[in-house]
Image (cartoon, grey):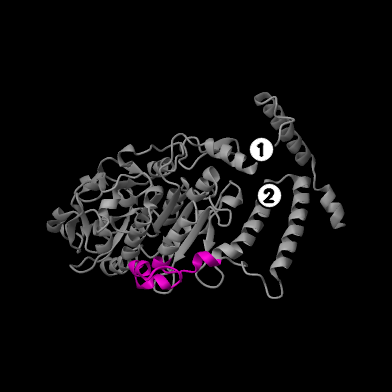
Amino acid sequence: MNPLREAQLVETRRHFFGRAAGGIGTAALASLLNPNLFGATAPSTEELGAQDLERYKKFAPKAKRVIYLFMSGAPSQLDMWDYKPQLEPWFDKDLPDSVRNGQRITTMTSGQTRFPIAPSTFKFNRHGKNGTWVSELLPHTAKIVDDIALLKSVNTEAINHDPAITYIQTGSQLPGRPSAGAWVSYGLGSMNANLPAFVVLHSTVNGGFGGQALYARLWGAGFLSTKHQGVSLRSNGDPVLYLSNPDGMSESMRRRMLDELAKLNHQRYQDVGDPEIQARIAQYEMAYRMQTSVPELTDISGEPDSVLESYGSDVKTPGTFAANCLLARRLAERGVRFTQVFIRQWDQHGNLPNDIRRQCGIIDQPCAALVNDLKQRGMLDDTLVIWGGEFGRTVYCQGKLTQDTYGRDHHPRCYTKWMAGGGIKPGISYGETDDFSYNVTKDPLHIHDLNATILHCLGVDHERLTYRHQGRDFRLTDVHGHVVDKILA
């Protein structure tokens, strides 16, 4: 078969009628809305961008950008934030049936003959103006409690890792929906033409990753254009694959190649009308510009020693959580809308006291340094920082319980996250849980409410940020979600 002939035949009846209907319908609607449109000068890309942005805005934004510090695997709220001193006499006693009340539990503990209560082995102390209780595991974060809003009543329906992470990232437990960062990119666009609107950073632990696997769909664009998906930066070699020119190719040669490739893609777009072709052209151009912007971004040699020291000793090791927190601040400085920093190994079903001490030792100082760094630069007011995982941990022990060690199973009914800056009221504690940190007793905060509030801080009405796909309108909060006014500044 002749390849040229194949290309000519690609316009099927479906392509023809689809393009014709779309073109005629769009033209008719445009003429009704603005009779003077035909014959007027086409709007610039800046004007189109402004129109696009205004579709979803309902109020002035407090935040321009988001930094999301995601603790994959579910950190224990009982050992870090949700202080329950009354549990000490309950050591190794069974969780009352009236507390669990027949609620679903995982298969990992459903076979246990009993559910012995494991009080936290860690000491808590009051910090800040309001005397917020914080675990000894977080001495650095304890110093910034007056800058954060502690959210103790977060809850979700998902009880296993992959559905739970998919749920909080995309608004659905089923894969295929756009991630939060992709929605923000789609709704607000980019503030820097030389960097993506959405960047993802993966943090190593003990030289590797481990823990629950993270899939690219968690920062994917779903049914939105692929130009909105997160760009994952690597810690080894080129931060982005194929960013450097291959041996033997000069910058001018690469520029000529991209120009010729763009011509071919434009021709193909004229043939089939697939908008993803336009997205691919834009991605090629972004990659070309990133050849200059990314090396400058990742070069921290110009950072003052005082700043580097504030993030901890790991900050100069690429890929560590400390290095990624500093990189997140540098991305925010350069106008990246949404930066997501992942760190795994929080899935502590056994030997929790040792494992959580290690994890907190990795994240505590960089988290506090990031908030302080943004604040000192005058950026915290318009940067929303979010910390937390996909669900919490049970008060009862999984496996063998001793005075020194215990494990905790998954617990979606209540857990703790925190937010800072970007329109969030500082120094508050929102929500309450029962004496066993098992059920919410006041001010429940569902993850749909969390996402609605994040968009609100960005000036976006979560009910208006929609995309029609397969005959229905989709949004990050699906058909749910309420903005939590009590935590807004």
Q: Residue at x 15, y 55 (%)?
A: 85
Q: Residue at x 58, y 46 (%)?
A: 224
Please state the extent of the stretch shown in magenta in the rendering. Answer: 295-323
Q: Is residue 6 above or below residue 101?
A: below
What secondary structure prevails in the magenta region?
A: helix
Picture quadrant where residue 237 is located: bottom right
Tally of numbered tags = 2
Find residue 273 and report its horizontal and vertical position in percent.
Answer: 73, 44
Type of amino acid under label 1: Pro
Which residue is identified by label 2? Answer: 278
- The numbered disc on residue 43 is 1
Quadrant location of the N terminus in the rendered image: bottom right
* Sooner in the amino-acid sequence: mark 1 or mark 2: 1
Q: Does the rendering let one see residue 214?
A: no
Find residue 448 and report its horizontal and vertical position in percent.
Answer: 40, 42
Quadrant location of the C terminus in the rendered image: top left
